[in-house]
Amino acid sequence: MSTVLVAVVALFAAAMGVWGCVSPAGLIGFVSRWRSPSRLWAAAAARLVFAAALWLAAPESRHPAVLRALALVALLAAVTIPLVGPARWEVFIDWWTRRSGAWIRGWALAALAFGVYLLWTLDA
């Protein structure tokens, strides 16, 4: 089950990467809807679930150490996001949505590469 969840997240990351490359404004619109405090908690919860899935899927992957390291990063993000608080969360979202199209495309390419890597490493 954890491998399936990681694959779903990988496909989501890759899809978001493609979307951001094709339409940076569309991705910015999506991200701008994450300003609310309830979305902050949803983002933290999603990262917590993703961290657990990465950790559990690691032994069956091509790069278990990398997946475990990514799980720890996701766990750190899950814990850090609520500590940031709603006000700073909104400031961060506002900052991110004001970046240039080239900057958004660069991060979108990174998301695409991350998603593809996760899918590849799960195919052990």
Image (cartoon, grey):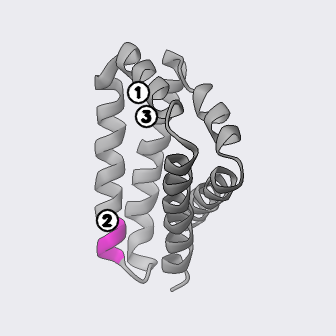
Give the residue displayed 49% in from the left and 37% down from the top: 99
Q: Is residue 96 above or below residue 35?
A: below
In what element is the residue under mark 3?
helix
21 is within the stretch colored magenta: no
Q: CA distance from mark 2 to mark 3?
A: 18 Å
Q: Earlier in the sequence, mark 2 or mark 3?
A: 3
Residue at 54 percent across and 61 percent down: it is 109
Horizontal arrangement in the rendering, residue 59 relative to residue 65 (left or right): right
Closer to the camera in the image, 24 or 73: 24
| Gap between marks 1 and 3 measured at Cα | 15 Å
Question: Mark 2 = which residue?
Answer: 68
The amino acid pointed to by label 3 is Ala
Circle 1 or circle 3, nearest the eye: 1
Picture mark count: 3
- Residue stretch rendered in magenta on the structure: 64-68
Q: Quadrant of the N terminus?
A: bottom right
Q: Is residue 90 above or below residue 48?
A: above
Q: Mark 1 or mark 2, which is nearer the start of the sequence? A: 2
Q: Tag 1: residue type? A: Phe
The residue carrying mark 1 is: 92
Residue 114 image position (x, y, % from top left): 49, 65
